[in-house]
Amino acid sequence: MPSMPSGQPCSWDGRPASILKGEKYKFMALQGSELLPGFVFTEEDPYIGIDLDACLTPEGPAPWAQQILEKFKDTYVEVSRSGTGLHIVCEVAFIPNFNMIKRGNKVDGGIEIMGKNCFMVMTMKGWPPNEPLKPVTDYTDEVCSLIDFLRETKGPIPKAFAQKRFW
């Protein structure tokens, strides 16, 4: 199993990687010699990643992101590497042939849901700040609702969420 420079692979909640349902955490060098911890979502694991881009302001999450956070409040949430976005990781029972859906952009606000063969850089910096990371939890129905909402969405993400809640 690949490991961080310390030699110890770790999970989303800081436990040794082998404890979380036997999953293998993968690490990839993305920038020069810098080794960035991350996870590759596969068909074999029950996880999915939700990347909320450009959603954090000095006052907190943007209103559109707050809608999503309210629905996924009991699962793993971390601040993204940029410091302006959030990652949500949750379990899903099964979404056949799902790879990825992306709407919006990294400047005005975007959402990317990552399934099989997608890599997410992990920071392990929990959200909200100063609270412990939560374990990964099943949110199959909510993920399916969000995917359906995004499939119907055209245009900027903040505007889409202002016009319609996705549940």
Image: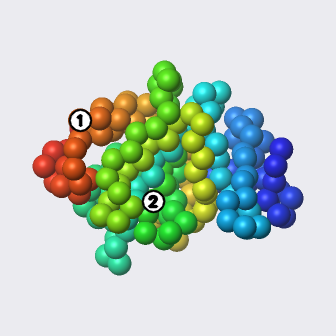
Snapshot quadrant of residue 162: bottom left
Q: Amino acid at mark 1?
A: Glu
Indicate which disc residue 86 carries.
2
Residue 154: % across, % down: 22, 44
Q: Amino acid at mark 2?
A: Leu
Indicate which disc residue 29 carries.
none
- Mark 2 element type: strand
Q: Residues within 10 Å of mark 2 (few under 14, many from 20)?
A: many
Q: Determine which residue is flagged by label 1.
A: 152
Q: Residue at x 42, y 47 (%)?
A: 112
The quadrant in which the N terminus is found is: top right
Q: Residue at x 57, y 42 (%)?
A: 118
Q: Nearer the viewer, residue 151 or 4?
A: 151
Q: Residue at x 73, y 52 (%)?
A: 27
Q: Nearer the viewer, residue 157 or 79?
A: 157
Foreground mark, 1 or 2, reads 1
Residue found at the very far front of the displayed protein = 32
The answer to whether residue 46 is seen in the rendering is yes
The quadrant in which the C terminus is found is: top left
